[in-house]
Image (spheres, helix red, strand yellow):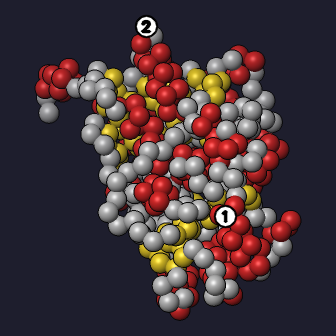
Amino acid sequence: MPQQAIAQANARAPARRIMFYSHDTFGLGHLRRSRALATALTEGDESASAIILTGSPVAGRFTFPERVDHIRLPGVTKLPDGSYISSTLGLDIERTTSLRSGLIQSAVEQYRPDLLIVDKEPAGFRGELLPTLEWLQEQGTCRVVLGLRDVLDDPKVLAAEWLRKDAVRAAEAYYDEFWVYGLKDVYDPTEGLPFSDATRARLHYTGYLRREIVEADDVPRTPYILITPGGGGDGAAMVSQVLEAYETDPTLKPDAVLVYGPFLSGEVREALDKRVDALGGRVAATGFDSRIEALFAGAQGVVCMGGYNTFCEVLSFDQRAVIVPRTTPRLEQWIRASRAEELGLVRMLDERRDGTGPAPMIAAIRGLADQPKPSQAGADGLLDGLDEVVRRAHILMERD
């Protein structure tokens, strides 16, 4: 397209352009958070559009609202030894990262965002975002925000990781603001990070990101509890524990709807499916549901892992919840669940405290009916995150 035509097309484009970077080497969390934020920032504002740069292999399974689109970056896979390889291209990780980095910069140069919101990783995956951040700083026309979930990891582990990645330097050098999608009274995810006072002055706690009910015709009409391991890639143990509870206690009620998540698949999924089939309809299972909010809204209770998005859904739909957090490779879920339990928002099932086997899970499921709802502990006051994000974004984009 000739340069004049490009200029004319840009002139006709929406006035506010927001870009999200979400490295997404594993799971659904980063993509789902970016999608919720993009929806809030463009909803009701015809002058706004958004593009999400994501490495998620399941981005195409989601629908995106009007004026929100996504660009899929070449995927990478983490090996058991901690190294990475290209998911599909057969390239070594250096060439894959270089390709991703070039695509990111090209997208930014063509789209020319007014605001770039980076999820969690200040320098991007293996530093792939640094050339773009340097270019944006030279241009001086785009505000840059680092978005952080409420919990990142154990403070000592996090400090060592950010030192290794040179992430503190990148955060302090390139970012106008830092948004924490939580509240400091609940947890400070930057504890242990050696930020300067000037950097901490740019830190804003938004509150948690409220999720909305979506209409769905296929939600069960009979009482059920929802079982969800989030993306599912590390959820087999939790799912197995729930199935063992139903196998052990034939009187256990209510029945359950199990959403495996897109990353719980293969032989592990097949083995779990056989156990589901043997329960004679007491547990219904599906692989993936992009409208899981409807299942949250209709459930009698929830058994889940402790990911950020799942926690937001528990609070948003005021669900009695039992959280079974993972403890490896990060303590993030355990920290979130234990703090939420302290605040009376959920119940945590911790094998070090509660023991193993089916008995603790049976007791937890039976106890859901009498468990206080999050609203009784003040959950409504935690969920102003989307409104605050919209407010902060408008302030940044209206700045001269």
Furthest residue in direction bottom, as rendered: 278
- Dot 1, how many residues are within 10 Å of its Cα: few (below 14), some (14-19), or many (20+)? many
Farthest top residue in view? 400
**Where is residue 8 drawn, in percent x and y?**
15, 22
**Quarter residue 90 falls in:** bottom left
Q: Residue at x 18, y 23 (%)?
A: 12
Tell me what residue is drawn at x 68 percent, y 77 percent.
241
Residue 51 placement: quadrant = top left
Q: Nearer the viewer, residue 312 or 363?
A: 363
Residue holding disc 2:
400
Q: Residue furthest right?
A: 353
Q: Looking at the picture, which amino acid does disc 1 mark?
A: Leu
Q: Amino acid at mark 2?
A: Asp
Q: Quadrant of the C terminus?
A: top left
Q: Position of residue 36 (x, y in %)?
A: 44, 42
Mark 2 and mark 1: Cα distance apart in space: 52 Å
- For the question of whether residue 82 can be seen, the reply is no
Q: Is residue 397 left or right of residue 384?
A: left
Reading the image, the residue beneath label 1 is: 368
Quarter of the figure that contains the N terminus: top left
Picture residue at 59% right of the left edge, 62% below the top: 302
Q: Earlier in the sequence, mark 2 or mark 1?
A: 1
Q: Position of residue 290 (x, y in %)?
A: 40, 58
Disc 1 on helix, strand or loop?
Answer: helix
Whether 114 is drawn above or below 250: the answer is above
Q: Is residue 211 left or right of residue 358?
A: left
